[in-house]
Structure formats: structure tokens, C-alpha cells
């Protein structure tokens, strides 16, 4: 009996220890490497070797998204891809779609734009992004040390 | 005196640690495996009645595929705190089939990365006919099994 209880205790603790960092990532945040040049000059991601690119801190704790914030979100056109862009417009504001039609963003919709306007797929390609797709707010650049600091 | 203090400290440590383990465990299970959801409303009748409790499998886009006819829980496009439960009527690039949107009978094509959702009870459902096709990133989980009420326990998700 004692052996079984002991084993269960150890297994439970092991499971708990593995789950702690996973839950931390989900609840608090995690670092991530930037891929792609779409947020230049704010974020550098243009080297094929991911460890040469900027590493940012993505925080799951954030106040209501507002224009100027940089957020990661699940791409509306590809649910396996995460995009990182800056909020340009919020709900209630007018935007012009790719087709030329002018719309007012509905409640919970955001217009995301690349800092590097020539490249990057953003809302000009796939339209407004629903807040339900938002994953985390990019708050800090962690690497390289020369650019360490909050993201503005 | 010191012995009482350190006993209290170890005890608090144990309690806090155990709480953290349990919380993280629950978080990981619901993020990677699934959960149990209480459903209300009549938009999915007769398949699902208000008050049914179902077991769900969390949808992970990198691992799972969405299939037409599946019943899914998605984050409401109009109210991000809510989960809505609907059936997948059409996948990306497909045509929906004739539906009535804003009084007109149309047959739209679903955009890349999106799905078209319909409630089984068309008269009483707010779904993609009102809020448009929904990006797959909003899909939260797939409804798998009904656990309550007892006389209707059983598998769900065979295309009705």
C-alpha cells in the first residue's frame, strides 16, 4: 500500500512540475523569436537563423488593446500561423478594405499593420482581426542587448 | 516558538505548492486535452438541448483538422468572453449551399482560413448567417460526447 501511495505521490509531483512551466507560458507569458522583416525597424527578424533575430517577451497580462500596441495573434487566413503587428485602428473607426470598400470596424475588431509597410501580410491582406484571435502583447525586446527595452 | 513558525511556513509552502501544481495541471489539461462544458440555449436542437453537459476535445490547429459536420465550440466573434456551440457547415474555399442571409438566398464561398457555422435549429440560431464566416483560430474545441442528462449519454459529432 505504501509503495503504491509513494509512487502516486511522486507521479503527481512530477506531473505538477511539468505542468507548472506550461501553465506559466499560458498564463503569464513567454519569450519568442521574431521571424520576418514586417515589423522593421522596431523588430528585426530577417535572418534565416532564428537566434540572430530579435527575441521579444510576449505577455499574457495586458490591458485593453489600443492603437500603437504590438500584439501577436492567430492569422485569420492560416490558423497555424502567428503574426505580430501593430494595432492601427480599433472598433468604431473607419478603414478601407483591399477591395476599396470603406467599413467601420465592428466591436472586437482591430486593424493590424506592419511597421514595415512595403512587406508583411497584415489587415490590408486579410482584413480586420477579431480580438478572440489575439494571443499576447509584445512588451519588451529581450535580445539583442543593444535593443533591450520596452517596445514602443 | 521557532518550531511552530517553521511548521507553519512548511505547511504554507506545501499548500501553495500543491495549489500551484493542481492549477497548472488543470490549465494544461484544458489547453491540450479538453474539458467539460455546460451548454445552454436551443440553437442546436434537436441534437443538443439546453442544459446538456458535454465533453470536449481542445482544438489545436497544428495537430487537428476541422471536418464538415463537426460540432465545435468557438469563441464568439461578437463577444470574446463567450463560447458558442455550432456545427461546421462549410470549410475554407467551399461554397456553403443555399442559405438566407439578410433576407436574400445566397450561396457564398468561404474565405481561406475560415469556416461557416450553422446551428442545427436554423430558426433559433445566431450563427455565420449573422456574423459571417469565422476564422479557424477562434475554434476552441470539438464536442465529442454528451455526459448529461443520463438517458441521452452518448457520442456526438457524427454528421447528423
Image (cartoon, rainbow, N blue to C red):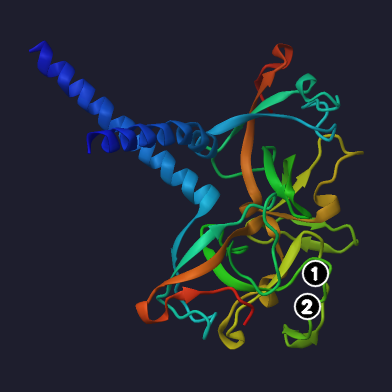
Tell me what residue is drawn at x 84 percent, y 67 percent. Answer: B93
Kind of element beneath mark 1: loop
Residue B41: percent from left, percent from top = 47, 78
Q: How many marks?
A: 2
Chain ID at mark 2: B
Tell me what residue is drawn at x 33 percent, y 38 percent. Answer: A8
Res B13 quadrant in image: top left
Could you tell whether A148 is left or right of A13 in the image?
right
**Upstream in sequence: badge 1 or badge 2:** 2
Q: What is the spatial separation of the Cα atoms under label 1 and label 2, in whole angstroms?
A: 7 Å
Q: Nearer the viewer, residue B116 or A70?
A: B116
Res B142 quadrant in image: bottom right
Which residue is tagged 2? B96
Crowdedness near tag 1: few (<14), some (14–19) or many (≥20) residues, C-alpha within 10 Å: many
Give yes or no for contact between labels 1 and 2 (Cβ–Cβ under 8 Å). yes
Which residue is tagged 1? B110
Chain ID at mark 1: B
On screen, A15 above or below B104?
above
Residue A150: percent from left, percent from top = 64, 23
Tell me what residue is drawn at x 12 percent, y 11 percent. Answer: B2
Q: Are marks 1 and 2 on the same chain?
A: yes
Residue A87: percent from left, percent from top = 71, 43
Q: Nearer the viewer, residue B98 or A48?
A: A48
Amino acid at each position: 500500500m505504501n509503495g503504491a501511495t509513494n509512487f502516486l505521490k511522486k507521479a503527481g509531483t512530477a506531473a505538477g512540475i511539468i505542468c507548472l512551466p506550461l501553465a506559466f507560458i499560458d498564463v503569464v507569458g513567454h519569450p519568442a523569436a521574431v521571424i520576418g522583416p514586417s515589423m522593421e525597424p522596431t523588430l528585426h527578424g530577417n535572418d534565416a537563423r532564428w537566434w540572430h533575430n530579435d527575441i521579444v517577451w510576449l505577455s499574457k497580462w495586458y490591458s485593453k488593446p489600443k492603437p500603437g500596441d504590438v500584439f501577436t495573434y492567430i492569422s485569420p487566413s492560416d490558423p497555424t500561423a502567428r503574426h505580430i503587428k501593430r494595432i492601427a485602428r480599433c472598433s468604431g473607426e473607419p478603414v478601407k478594405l483591399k477591395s476599396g470598400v470603406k467599413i467601420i470596424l465592428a466591436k472586437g475588431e482591430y486593424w493590424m499593420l506592419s511597421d514595415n509597410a512595403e512587406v508583411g501580410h497584415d489587415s490590408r491582406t486579410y482584413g480586420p482581426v477579431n480580438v478572440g484571435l489575439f494571443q499576447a502583447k509584445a512588451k519588451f525586446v529581450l535580445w539583442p542587448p543593444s535593443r533591450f527595452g520596452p517596445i514602443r | 516558538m521557532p518550531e511552530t513558525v517553521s511548521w507553519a511556513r512548511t505547511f504554507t509552502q506545501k499548500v501553495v505548492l500543491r495549489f500551484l501544481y493542481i492549477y497548472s495541471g488543470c490549465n494544461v489539461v484544458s489547453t491540450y486535452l479538453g474539458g467539460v462544458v455546460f451548454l445552454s440555449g436551443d440553437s442546436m436542437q434537436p441534437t443538443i438541448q439546453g442544459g446538456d453537459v458535454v465533453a470536449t476535445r481542445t482544438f489545436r490547429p497544428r495537430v487537428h483538422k476541422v471536418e464538415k459536420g463537426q460540432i465545435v465550440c468557438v469563441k464568439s466573434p461578437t463577444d470574446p468572453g463567450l463560447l458558442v456551440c455550432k456545427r461546421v457547415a462549410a470549410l475554407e474555399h467551399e461554397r456553403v449551399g443555399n442559405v438566407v442571409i439578410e433576407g436574400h438566398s445566397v450561396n457564398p464561398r468561404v474565405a481561406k482560413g475560415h469556416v461557416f457555422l450553422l446551428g442545427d435549429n436554423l430558426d433559433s440560431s445566431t450563427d455565420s448567417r449573422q456574423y459571417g464566416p469565422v476564422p479557424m483560430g477562434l475554434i476552441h474545441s470539438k464536442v465529442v460526447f454528451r455526459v448529461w442528462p443520463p438517458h441521452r449519454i452518448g457520442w456526438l459529432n457524427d454528421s447528423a
